[in-house]
Image (tube, grey):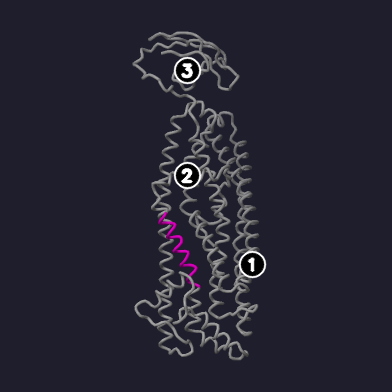
Amino acid sequence: MFGGPHGPRAILSQETLKPKSASATLARLAQHFGPFWPSLFAAVVMVIVSTWAQVTTPEMIGQLVDCYLAPSAGSAFAGFPGASAAGASNAQSNCWLAEGHAPSGLSQTIIKAAFTAGGFPAPNDAASLTQDDRLSGLGRLILLIIALFVGGALLTGLTFFAMTWAGQHVLRALRLEVFAHLHALPLSYYAEQEAGDLMSRITNDTETINQAISFALVNVASGVLLLAWIAYNMLTKNVPFALLSMSVTPIMLLATVYFSGQARKAFRKTRVEMGSVNANLQESISAVREVQAFNRAEENIEQFRVTNAANRDANVRAVAFTSALAPALEALGYLALAIVTCAGGLALLNGAELFGTAVSLGLVITFLGYVQRFNHPIQQISVLWTNIQSAIAGAERIFNLLDVVPAVQDKANAKEMPVIQGEVEFAGASAEYVKGTPVLHQVSFKVRPGQTVAIVGPTGAGKTTIINLIPRFYDVTGGAIKV
């Protein structure tokens, strides 16, 4: 179970936004990573190698048993007819580290080469091994297993660093690009948008992308690779045993989908309620003078009490679902381990066969290690996939903002503005904020330098509009303004 700032509650509590065009958004976001492709390539290589280390470790522990401990372990089954002899025979045939046994695939070839490096002898007939042979072989394998653990952990840490480094550089460029673009947009755009939403795109949306790049993407990629690799290894070693080992997986998937889905719905509600709390706070604090002048403090406090209670109830419901997910998956994981242990143990006690296929003690231990590693990524992928979806949607929101074309633009052949004298002339100028609803209609007047003009009229007559047109906060829809 992974917790902390990247745990299920922290990730599921994020607003689940679904992108409209994930492929187009990802392609556009990928362009920003162009200058950092060496870091991304290194991260991909490190993910593959660290995943290989996770997959290989259980197999090496199985080799440790089958190659060096099988005869001793086999004596424990001496009371069961055929169990000891069959188990020892299967162990010997499964010991691909032994001399004369050809390793299957690149992974076993690498491990065997590392094991026999420096002229270290490969194990022969396990029954004829001396105590010193066993101890030296066990020590050699244990050192290799420790090296895999340490190497895998270091590569995982370096992968997160590489992705975070590249991601932070990309996000810095994105924030600067969005910030500069906002300064190029006219006042009319800000009149139609909420300032909080625009700020959210620079802060919250970019932070969502950062979490996806530096944490979620790496874990989902390594999780999918780990699941596929383990499933392949189990199926190539023993199909009936593999299917039995993965029998709990569909139930885990259903439990994860159900609890994660319910938690996401509940956390959406918390986002809505939190928005109400923030809105209530903003309105009360920004209008504190009016609140005190009209003695509205008690009413505002009561309203805040109601919205705060609704936010509390929504969070309690959301936490209930996330709290149920972890123990449910943990229980199913223990069930899978129990199935592998019972099936493997019964097979070893009954001629070392399972549905007609050979089983050794080392194979059972290998499958136990596989099952332990197989369960965790299922939960991780389900939870983190939501984070990736939200990041794509956040990137889409950022790109939508960057695609906004400023309504006020200079012509391609516009002349450089000379030093002006201060004369302003409205020549039949018309303006409208909403298309089809004119605010000014063919207004004409001239103001000379140093002249003072008073513009009077009822509310909505267009006084403020005239002032906004002079610095070109808006463009006229008809006529011209000359300076």
Residue 174, compared with residue 10, is above or below; it is above
Whether 57 is among the magenta residues is yes
Q: Nearer the viewer, mark 1 or mark 3?
A: 1
In depth, the one of 331 and 431 nearer the eye is 431
Q: Which residue is mark 2?
A: 29
- Which label sits on residue 58? none
* Residue located 44% across and 29% down the image: 184
* Residue located 63% across and 56% down the image: 257
Residue 139, image x, y percentages: 41, 80
Q: Quadrant location of the C terminus?
A: top left
Range drawn in magenta:
41-58
Disc nearer the start of the sequence (1/2): 2
| Image side of residue 215 versus residue 449, left or right | right
Q: Which residue is mark 1?
A: 248
Q: CA distance from mark 1 to mark 2?
A: 38 Å
Q: CA distance from mark 1 to mark 3?
A: 71 Å
Q: Label 3: few (<14), some or many (≥20) within 10 Å?
A: few
Q: Nearer the viewer, mark 1 or mark 2?
A: 2
Q: Main secondary structure of the magenta part?
A: helix
* Residue located 64% across and 63% down the image: 250
Q: Which residue is mark 3?
A: 467
Q: Label 2: few (<14), some or many (≥20) within 10 Å?
A: some
Are the residues tagged 3 and 2 within 8 Å (C-beta)? no
Residue 422, compared with residue 91, is above or below; it is above
Amino acid type, label 3: Ile
Q: Quadrant location of the N terminus?
A: bottom right
**Residue 320 visible in this rendered orientation of the protein:** no
Q: Label 1: few (<14), some or many (≥20) within 10 Å?
A: some
Whether 314 is among the magenta residues is no
Residue 75, image x, y percentages: 55, 89
Residue 477, compared with residue 212, is above or below; it is above
Amino acid type, label 2: Leu
